[in-house]
Amino acid sequence: MASRKYEQVLRAEAAEETRRRILDAVGQCLREAPTEQPSLGRVAELAKVSRSTIYTDFGSRSGLFDAFVVDLWQRTGLAALGRAVEATNARDHLRDGIRAASRMKGQELAVYRVLHAMDRLDPESAGGAVRHMETDRRAGMQSLAEHLEREGELREGLTVDEAVDVLWVLTSFESLDLLVTGRGHTIDEAIGTLVAMAERAVCRTPGTPAARSRDA
């Protein structure tokens, strides 16, 4: 019985190692050839597995890219982002959320850039993985704007929908990338700029009376 259990552990470890190699191979493809669509054949070659193994582990090309994005999030700071969006204070939610999400992207700037470019040029090329990311981000911006409104922190005259539009732009990958590659800022400098811009754009000026929340 002990021997059988040991063999099961070894098989599980081997399967996880294979999965790790495949996901790492996707990232290598995106970094090495950012202008080319990563082929499953090339991924299989780099991971030293057969194409059938990829289909067995991930089901399809879209399944592979979905798994790659989830792994990318987890490796680059999904836990920190989760803590940030659970902040009870709305301004902390805004500041820490933007910082955490931007640091996630900043750790793999080249990979995120390729994923977004693939989605623009051929939405099916990454199996919808980027659209799934953006759907989650849209929900996050809606939640943040509503949190700011509940606490009376929205700038006077600004609606929740307008705040979502502003936050949507400022938390986009493109905004971070433009500050880093276009303006030459470090990731930390770009994050500081985005946080300050967001706070000025959607939050009431400190010292002014808080707007009445919709729950008041």
Image: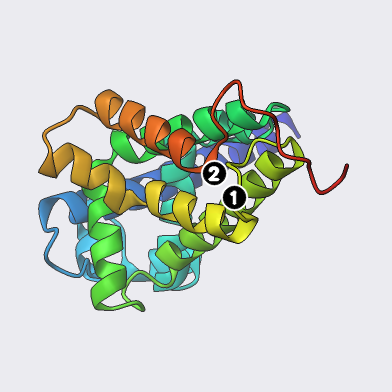
Disc marking residue 118: none
What crowding class fits label 2: few (fewer than 14 Cα within 10 Å), some (14-19), or many (20 or more)? few
Please tell me whether residue 41 is drawn above or below residue 179 in the rendered image: below
For the N terminus, the image quarter is top right
Q: Look at 47% across and 31% down and name the residue there.
A: 100
Q: Nearer the viewer, residue 9 or 58?
A: 58
For the C terminus, the image quarter is top right
Q: Nearer the viewer, residue 203 or 123?
A: 203
Of callouts 2 and 1, the N-terminal one? 2
Query: Mark 1 — residue?
Result: 140
Amino acid at dot 1:
Gly
Q: Position of residue 193 (x, y in %)?
A: 31, 31
Q: Look at 62% across and 56% down and name the residue there.
A: 159
Q: Look at 60% across and 20% down and name the residue there.
A: 207
Please tell me whether residue 65 is drawn above or below residue 145 in the rendered image: below
Q: Position of residue 153 (x, y in %)?
A: 65, 35
Please tell me whether residue 74 is drawn above or below residue 57 in the rendered image: above
SS state under label 1: helix
Query: Mark 2 — residue?
Result: 11
